Image (spheres, coloured by chain):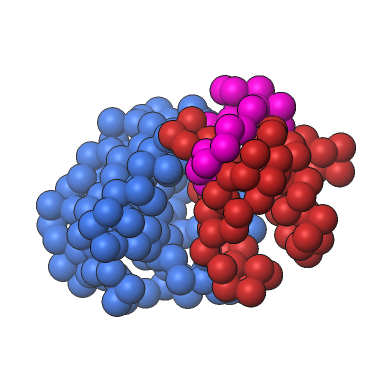
Chain colours: A blue, B red
Amino acid sequence: MLSLSIDHVNAIVATCIRALPDEGCGLLLGTPDGSVVEVMASPNAARSSRVYEVDSRVLLQAYRRADDEGLLVIGVFHSHTHSEAYPSPTDVHQAPDPLWHYVLVSLRDATAVMRSYRIIDGIVSEEEVRR
Amino acid sequence: MTAKVRIPTVLRPALGGVTSLAVEGSTIGEILNRLTSDYPAIRGQLVNEDGTLHRFLNVYVNDDDVRYLGGVDAPVANDDEITLLPAVAGGFL
């Protein structure tokens, strides 16, 4: 289960909308029980509407800040601009951390859709998102 | 030169669970060579067969991404902190 506030949801969706036409992305800092404490937006280093990569400086900052604040990097969010909020085969292949929460935002339709997944040994399972 | 190498969570099981290691070397390439000769199981996650940095590995010397410092040729000074972090990426490639 992923827990996050409406402010966190707004920060995630706003980051993804601002990144258009590219995919947007960022990292989630929080606690091992899946509670998000902070959303760190990142530029999409891939600058693409098809792929994303968290900026390497933001990635280092996120780990440093997590260490300083007694938190963990617990997941990542990114948008799909023209498809549903479900991990693509590449997302699955490049999802190395079974402890992470993989949040997908679809901007395909007029209303943004956000879902969260665990990806363990290549198996995708959707999880509850609680606000 | 001895640098402190911070090990990312995903590589820790292959390294007996350690969070950091002291590794000798004067460039990033030397540090990674030492690390992969001590722990061959992680070689494929750090470098390509030609010795260049793996596309999906970020390596930092202190605060700087080594891609902007010469890659495997980036110099390492005594007591530098090297951080290894797998890239976070995905999409419809």
User: Exactly how many numbered labels are in the figure?
Assistant: 0
- Report the side of A69 relative to B89 (left or right): left
Instruction: Tell me if residue A124 can be seen.
Output: no
**Rendered view: B70 above or below A5:** above
Q: Quadrant of residue B31?
A: top right
**Residue A96 image point, x, y percent:** 58, 62
Image point 40% across, 47% down: which residue? A78
Image point 23% across, 39% down: which residue? A14
Quadrant location of the N terminus of chain B in the rendered image: top right
Q: Which residues are magenta?
A: B65-83
Image point 42% across, 43% down: which residue? A60
**Rendered view: A3 above or below A85:** below
**Residue B48 image point, x, y percent:** 80, 43
- Report the side of B24 relative to A120 (left or right): right
**Rendered view: A98 above or below A72:** below
Residue B45 is a magenta residue: no
**Residue B26 image point, x, y percent:** 69, 34
Residue B70 is a magenta residue: yes
**Residue A37 image point, x, y percent:** 20, 59
- Report the side of A44 relative to A109 (left or right): right
- Report the side of A78 relative to B59 (left or right): left
Q: Which residue sits furthest right?
A: B50
- Along the line of sight, the residue nearer the viewer: A127 or B69: B69
Quadrant location of the C terminus of chain B in the rendered image: top right
Instruction: Tell me if residue A129 can be seen.
Output: yes
Image point 46% across, 59% down: which residue? A86
